[in-house]
Amino acid sequence: MILEAKNIYKSYSQNGGKKLEILKGIDFTAEEKKITIIVGASGAGKSTFLHILSGLDNPDKGEVLINGTNIYSLSDDEQISKFRNKHIGFIFQFHHLLPEFTAIENVALPQLINGTDRESAMKNAAELLDLVGLSDRTGHKPSELSGGEQQRVAVARALINKPDIIFADEPTGNLDSKNSEILHNLFVDLNKKLGASFLIVTHNPNLVKLADEVYEMVDGKIFKKNYFTKSK
Amino acid sequence: MFEFFIAKRYLRSKHKINFITIISVLSTLGITIGVAALVIVLSVFNGFGSLVTSVLVNFDPHVRIVFKSPDAVAKADSVAALLQNYKDVKSVTRFAEGKVILVNKNSYEIVNLQGIETDTNNSDWGIQNYISFGKFDLSGNKRTGKIILGLPLALKLSCRIGDTLLVTSASKIEQSLITLSLPKTKKFVVSGIFEISNRDYALKYTYTSLEQAQRILGLRKNFTGFDVRLKNIDNSGDLKSALVSALGEKDFTIRTWYDLHKDLYDVMLIERWAAYIILSLIIAVATFNILGSLTMSVIEKKKDIGVLRAIGTSKKSILKIFMFEGILIGVIGTVLGLILGLLVCYLQIEYKFYSLDASKYIIDALPLKVEFTDIIVISLMSMFLTFLASLFPAKRAVGIPVNEAIRWE
């Protein structure tokens, strides 16, 4: 198990003092080298769950272990950030590339952050951009790239530190069907070639078809689904 | 350092909110103007200050000891010995001073008569370097003395070299009223006329030999005090402390060159500080602009901060990025300001663009003296204000919760 979540609770306080419970005691695991997918209705708490699993938000109760490390037991911000940088990759729905930096600089950023020298970081970034089919776009700024290309840059960025697991929150939610297909195939490709583990939240049925494991989130709890998987 | 790399890029980039760029440029400009103004104004103060000081110090002793009582007079020899033992002493001279009335035909003036020693080798200061007419000759005999006075005074008395003046001691006049005797009057021949830039001194002080002064002032063998010149003027305070602890201040008045014109020097110092503080306000206002533009930049970059945090940037690094952005503005502004300020100073010193009427101001152009310590202090102060102004918005950036920032679309 590359990821293990135990007894995750999360609620938000609303106006009037009432507490809105989003996650109600979830236990969850994701396997290494597999594409795991979580589906569910909007507002069911998928994004919140993903943020908690990747350390971007704190649960009210519960533990998250990534490759054996309990990420919420790490004592200070420096340690958590370092862990996030080295072990976790994140792909957002809205690309979220830094607009002032070129594609290659965006991809290299996670390595520059952990102190890798500029030359090596740029070299690794170039290799990854080549892997995602964008070697002719390295010097472009995000505004000069199409939506699909931006998302591929985001994928390359998520991979550069060879993380234990890559989280993706509706990665193709903003893309047309053609670009979505390119991206889906890219996930499968990377999973096969590099053995990359993915945990993806999505609505897209085409992506669900490519998963190794599928879960559904309903009312703050998670259930395994046995259809729509490759293994069928 | 990746934080510096990001900060530099942020500073250069075109902002979505164009206003941020405008304010950043205005901040830089404000700091430049403030720093340049400080450099120029402080250098002018330094220039005038050192001019005034040098004019006075060429005339004044470095330390003056005056006897306040007959007890003190009795200790004169031991004081002399003390002074000779002080390491940095260049010359020790005795002087006698008192108020006299000078009469020339129908004109008269009440002035200070200073009796000085002429046989000691202390020609680097005092009156002998400023004789314009006649010569520095204070020799006299029992009947007639020699006197040297300033040009403005000579004009007032309508006297020339060779004229004879009648000199009467002012305190003797007082005595004569009590004892009903005639005050002692002596003839002095004008042997020299001096010109100095300090008009006050030129009107007030006249010079003769120590012996002649002692005679006319009725001091006999006594004298008023010692004038000390040191090899290094900076030791004046040290010598004063040594003398005060050895002699006390009951019987002696011990003053340094600074004390002799304390009010003037103090005023100059206060003016300098006032200028420094007021001009620093220019820089402070400019740094407020940095606070404004940086705060806007943080708000604009909320999403980016979220992304950076998500890919593993620590809070400390986020702080660094935005602090660097602000500090860069400060550094650029300060450096440009120093260059501008020093350039203007150089041009004034070399080409004397701002000239002055030499007959009124003794110098022909606005005096400037650039002190290295001023440059350091100005730079440090500017950087410190910039640092403070950057801290608040940078801390704001750190406070943004990651998941909130990412959802912001």
Image (cartoon, rainbow, N blue to C red):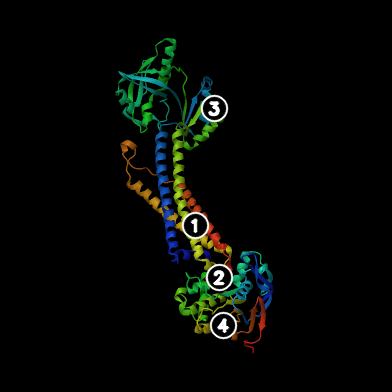
Q: Secondary structure at mark 1?
A: helix
B171 w.r.t. B363: above or below = above
Neighbours of disc 4 within 10 Å: few (<14), some (14-19), many (20+): some
In front: label 4 or label 1:
4
Tags 3 and 1 touching, CB below 8 Å: no
Number of numbered callouts drawn: 4
Tell me what residue is drawn at x 50 percent, y 70 percent: A98
In front: label 3 or label 1:
1
Name the residue beneath numbered marker 2: B406
Report which quarter residue A191 is drawn in.
bottom right
Report the Cα–Cα distance between label 4 and label 1.
Answer: 45 Å
Disc 2 with disc 1 on a shared chain: yes
Disc 4 with disc 1 on a shared chain: no
Q: In this orientation, which residue lies closer to the viewer: A160 or B240?
A: A160
Return the chain for callout 1: B
Q: Secondary structure at mark 2?
A: helix
Q: Of the two numbered discs 2 and 3 on the same chain, state the one appearing first in sequence.
A: 3
Name the residue beneath numbered marker 1: B291
Report the Cα–Cα distance between label 2 and label 3.
Answer: 76 Å
Tags 4 and 2 touching, CB below 8 Å: no
Return the chain for callout 3: B
Report the Cα–Cα distance between label 2 and label 1.
Answer: 25 Å
Name the residue beneath numbered marker 4: A204
Q: Amino acid at mark 2?
A: Ile
In percent of width and height, residue A124 lies at 53, 75
Q: Of the two numbered discs 2 and 1 on the same chain, state the one appearing first in sequence.
A: 1
Name the residue beneath numbered marker 3: B249
Tell me what residue is drawn at x 31 percent, y 39 percent: B357
Tags 2 and 3 touching, CB below 8 Å: no
Tags 4 and 1 touching, CB below 8 Å: no
Q: Amino acid at mark 1?
A: Leu
Q: Could you tell me if residue A111 is visible in this image? A: no
